[in-house]
Image: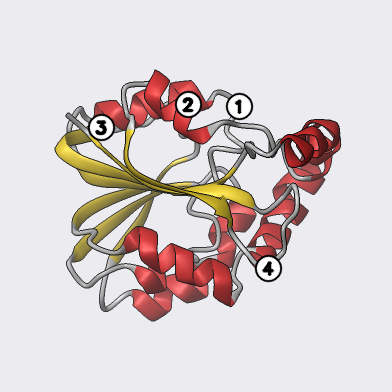
Amino acid sequence: MGWWRERVVPGLADRSLRGHEIGGLRAEVCAGLDGVVLELGFGGGLNLRFLPDAVTRVDAVEPADRGWALSERRREREAARVTVERVGLDGQRLEADDASYDHVLCTFTLCTIPDPALALAEVRRVLRPGGSFRFLEHGLAPEPRTARWQRRLDPLQRRVAGGCHLTRDVPALLAATGLPPSEVTAGYLTRARSPWTYGYRGRSVRG
């Protein structure tokens, strides 16, 4: 499964998460970012085109070499506008000083991090006071029927999708780690209503 997770899953994620509908949500979550941004789960760099010109640098945390390679063309295309540097492999242990980032960006990543609470505690640590955590994540639906299917499918999803969970309660995770959302929109992320498409987007502000 190591080969599948390292070589295949990044490509599948890149293809499935770059559509027009998801792109519109990425643009919404990235709006208003500025300064120095840390991105957890950089992947193929699908957020780069949506970053405002006010963003001066992106520090990327990306565990998969294949994911980083997929982003090369996008990084080259945006190089004149924003500097991107790979700074780590593990969102649970950030190699950064306290209060060193203006914002942290996280899209379709909390589902896969083994200990999301630990990662969010690190996010809070590295955010400057008043800085924001921007998120776009799929997760547990409040609708009983969808949630039942998510729980049934979760073991298979984790196996074939590199540890991805369908049942993480994103707002509850944020609240429990001291980053309660100041803005959150919940609902199906695409017109297709399925166990895979319910999610959350919004922001938390570091107090």
Q: Which residue is at the front of the view, 124 or 28?
A: 28
Which SS class for mark 1?
loop
- Tell me the CA gap for discs 2 and 1: 16 Å
Read off the residue under disc 4: 15
Residue 81, x across and y down, in percent: 25, 75
Earlier sequence position, callout 4 versus callout 2:
4
Compared with 24, 120 (above or below) is above
For the residues labelled 4 and 1, say whether their Cβ atoms are less than 8 Å apart. Answer: no
On residue 172, which mark appears?
Answer: 2
- For the point 41% across and 19% down, the residue is 176
**Snapshot quadrant of residue 204:** top left
Hey, what amino acid is under mark 1?
Answer: Pro
Hey, what amino acid is under mark 2?
Answer: Ala
56 relative position to 137: left or right = left
Compared with 129, 38 (above or below) is below
For the residues labelled 1 and 3, say whether their Cβ atoms are less than 8 Å apart. Answer: no
For the residues labelled 2 and 3, say whether their Cβ atoms are less than 8 Å apart. Answer: no
